[in-house]
Amino acid sequence: MNMEETTTKEKILKRVRDALISKMENPFKDVDSGSPVMIGIEEEKEVAFARKLMEMGGTFIYCENEKNLGENLKFLLDQKGWKDFFLLDKKLELLFRSLNIPFQNNPDLFNNMVAGVTRCEYLIARFGSVLVSSGLDTGRRMFVFPESHVVVAYTSQVVEELQDALKGMRKRYQEKFPSQMTVITGPSRTADIEKTLVMGAHGPRELYVFVVDDED
């Protein structure tokens, strides 16, 4: 290292030391840290969720009621040529039986499933995301293993922001908070393989969200 380089380095270090020692007035003292960081969502949160979900490659299906949910699920089975859905959720089992939707939950056939169905905790309008957790009956594998992930949700589960969902989770679970929460934003994808977009790289390649209107 020559003399010129040493001198330049010393000058830079001196400026850093002086800056650390000297006291400056906070130029941002009037910032309101309690105000929202993002601009509020102008459209209805259900519409915002649907639009963002589709932008991220997911499929949104609105259902007027649970009867309409059954019709739409049967249509998806016919459209995709699937024999049935795979689910591991007691509440969904009861619902699917009442709607006469074919399903199976044989653990020996888990690795062969094509379309797995789960519930969710919340739908986040800001990002078109689905919040799931280990607190649901399905466990953790159902969110990542099936080739096609089908989510059954209700309009009352749609919130504007992630923080709204987290507040709801704290209220819902209180002392028994789930050990794992996952935010799903569209189908699994990556562009790390030769800079080519690959769907289903780390999870489902298709995401379907059926939202049943349960609010008058």
Image (cartoon, rainbow, N blue to C red):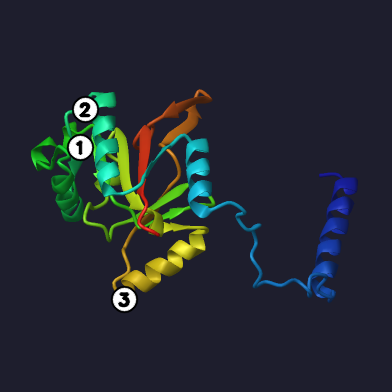
Residue 184 relative to residue 65: left or right: right
Mark 3 crowd level (few <14, some 14–19, many ≥20, 10 Å Cα): few
Query: Circle 2 sits in a helix, a strand or a loop, which is it?
Result: loop
Depicted 142 relative to depicted 132: above or below: above
Which residue extends farthest front?
216
Query: What residue is drawn where x is 25% and y is 45%?
Result: 67
Query: What residue is drawn where x is 45% and y is 44%?
Result: 185
Amino acid type, mark 2: Trp
For marks 1 and 3 on the same chain, the one whose residue lies earlier in the sequence:
1
Residue 31 relative to residue 146: left or right: right
Q: Quadrant of the N terminus?
A: top right
Residue 32 relative to residue 207: left or right: right
For mark 2, what is the residue?
82
Depicted 59 relative to depicted 44: above or below: above
For marks 3 and 2 on the same chain, the one whose residue lies earlier in the sequence:
2
Amino acid type, mark 3: Glu
Depicted 181 relative to depicted 168: above or below: above
Badges 3 and 2: C-beta atoms under 8 Å apart? no
Query: In terms of depth relative to the viewer, which is nearer, 76 or 38?
Result: 76
Badges 2 and 1: C-beta atoms under 8 Å apart? yes
Query: What residue is drawn where x is 82% and y is 60%?
Result: 13
Query: Circle 3 sits in a helix, a strand or a loop, which is it?
Result: loop
For mark 1, what is the residue?
85
Query: What is the x, y in percent for residue 180?
Result: 34, 58
Query: What residue is drawn where x is 20% and y is 34%?
Result: 113
Query: In terms of depth relative to the viewer, which is nearer, 214 or 183?
Result: 214
Amino acid type, mark 1: Phe
For mark 3, what is the residue?
175
